[in-house]
Amino acid sequence: MSVNKMQIMVCGGSSCHGNQSEDILDNLRIELEANALENNVTVTGTGCFGLCALGPVVKIMPGDVVYTSVSPEDAKEIVTEHVMKGRKVERLLYKDAATGKTISTEGELASHRKQLRIVLRNCGIIDPEDIDDAIAHNAYEALGKVLTEMKPADVIRIIKDSGLRGRGGGGFPTGLKWEIASKNKSDEKYVVCNADEGDPGAFMDRSVLEGDPHSVLEAMAICGYSIEAHKGLIYIRAEYPLAVARLKTAITQAKDYGLLGTNILGTGFDFDIEIRYGAGAFVCGEETALIHSMEGLRGEPTVKPPFPAEAGFRGKPTNVNNVETFACISPIILKGAEWFNSIGTEKSKGTKVFALAGKINNVGLIEVPMGTTLREVIFEIGGGIRKGKKFKAAQTGGPSGGCLTEKHLDTPIDFDNLTAAGSMMGSGGLIVMDEDDCMVSVAKFFLDFTVEESCGKCAPCRIGNKRLHELLEHITKGKGNLADLDRLKNMSLVIKDTSLCGLGQSSPNPVLSTLENFREEYVSHVTTKKCPAGQCKDLMEYFIISANCVGCTACARVCPVNAITGERKEPHLINPSICIKCGACMEKCKFDAIIIR
Amino acid sequence: MKPINSISVLKKKKNQILEKKHQTGKTRVRVHMGTSGLASGAKEIYELFRLELEKRNIDSYVISTGDMGYSFAEPTVEVTRPGEAPVVFGNVDKLRADEIIEKYIKNGEFIDGILPVNYRTI
């Protein structure tokens, strides 16, 4: 066959799929067959085109023609007109409401796509172990520009003007951070990259380091130039062996080319980067704890001030930025502050990478401009909730954040809106929960994590979180009462107010936000002793509806503790005092006779 | 490696690399091998493409990259036929890899489960 054979692609993303794209696919095949064209034209279903608002979408090659809002009935016209006569079906082409212009190719529709990749620009594109591939994709060009055309103060001004805010969680203006570090005079200064990504469910830093390590190395050198530091340190957890290996390779290759080391690009600027390993402690994402860990001390935070910018690593001025923050630097230098500033919302500029996890169809990384709504992220890009279940909540900011609910779906996501909604941006993990998730258990899960990860230095965090966890444990076991809910809230507020570092100051957030948004679930746990989601084992009971039970004995045979009794062809019974609530019987029953009550 | 000791050398180097890339006229296969990809078996798929493309005498080269973020469809593979736009295939197992080689790489024929570009970039 020839390469020029016609090919029709039908979008099978969840939005298009929900609008009968499957039928479109079938109808196209039927029409082609009816015209004996099935061997000349291939029809395939694809993943999401990112044009959900215009869907269902059908694309035809060659020609890159995209039809929008296609219905199954349009298949006939597409085949008879476009395929057979080579005429575009005008009425199915997208018309730009503003200009009235008809748009026919996918390239021209690109602006309708919700995702914009700045941080992830090279991930999956370049070979991270080949510096030449990176150079072909503009690596070290920004460093060259900075070293030859700009003064350190100019670099800081560009970063300040761009409006870039730290992507590690706090959202502190990056330019300001650099300025403070540059103003503190010292014989030695340090640039530190915080790659201690610890939020459960977040993996954007890992992907950047694995996919595009040079973008981070280059940005660290740029930062070094602007604050007059000559030494860079990357603090990375040893649990990321692949990221570590690729970073090492990248550093070696950059040094071989002289893009790191002494007299970089013949400008007399020296900058060297080393790797420091962490053992994967959540608290070491806090910058003072991180610095102590790098110094070989216990990874415990200390009171700020002094901020690292005044006295950080080895008591010298130190600038700590997150991986994702660094990955934004080179594009800002090359394309200008104004460009970056034009993306995003009023106070949050640029894009944010989110790691979608939990009960969502398209688990993975996405990058969207700040100000994209949660609905767009979850239901368009993320492909909606798994198995068609109902959306309940999304946890942002990991164990330090809070949950967003249905009422927040149309809130534009940025630093300030998330804080106002009782959550936080955090590093960008987004864990999606559906109707089957018990919010008390979710709060308990995150508390479990923080209790484990608390360094133990200050009492509110060490003891308070433990007590919070015990209270939640109590409630999920059906031993709580209404007064416990007030105690939960009061204790949370005290822990937040009195803890030393960000870990303790934010660890009660999941409790507070679930209490705020799902109080009725807590109430039902403590009053009627029922878990509405049917997740808390102690509050549920497996029960056989005798009318449905045919006495096949399948459940009794699969029960690991012999809790089910009954004669053949007679309704069975579950003995609740023996039952361990494993659910094996319910899975096995073919007659829907076993329920949770 | 020859050091890059000035910005003009860097630019020259970049142009040389780009020129070489454009000249090859070979089909390029990128296997996405970040942690998500590797956990789903990307290494095996990478080896398979290297071996099979050579065995089947297809003028091509295979490289490994990081992940594109499509964790839900790993392993993912991107194929660029000379002069054409890249096409990304998801959930690539041994069978699909063979289908990709026979149908798309050899003939340019699409198969089900392509992951279209759904983002803008800079």
Image: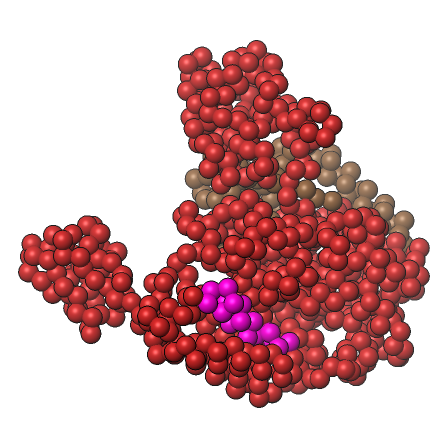
Chain colours: A red, B brown
Most frequent secondary structure within the magenta stretch = helix
Give the x, y percent position of residue A380. Answer: 55, 44
| Residue found at x 53% / y 32% | A56
User: Relative to A134, does residue A303 appear above or below in the rendering?
Assistant: below
User: Relative to A429, does residue A196 appear above or below in the rendering?
Assistant: below
- The boundaries of the magenta stretch are A502-519
Give the x, y percent position of residue A294. Answer: 69, 79
Inspect this view and state whether residue A518 appears: yes
User: Relative to B98, does residue B43 appear above or below in the rendering?
Assistant: below
| Residue found at x 32% / y 70% | A528
Q: Does the magenta portion include A579?
A: no
Report how many numbered discs are placed on residues in the image. 0
| Residue found at x 84% / y 72% | A180
* Quadrant, the C terminus of chain A: bottom left
- Residue in the foreground of this view, choosing between A542 and A220: A542
Give the x, y percent position of residue A315. Answer: 79, 83
| Residue found at x 68% / y 23% | A102
A242 displayed left or right of A235: left
Q: Does the magenta portion include A509?
A: yes
Inspect this view and state whether residue B37 appears: no
Question: Which image quadrant is residue A533 in?
Answer: bottom left
B1 displayed left or right of A596: right
Give the x, y percent position of residue A61. Answer: 59, 25
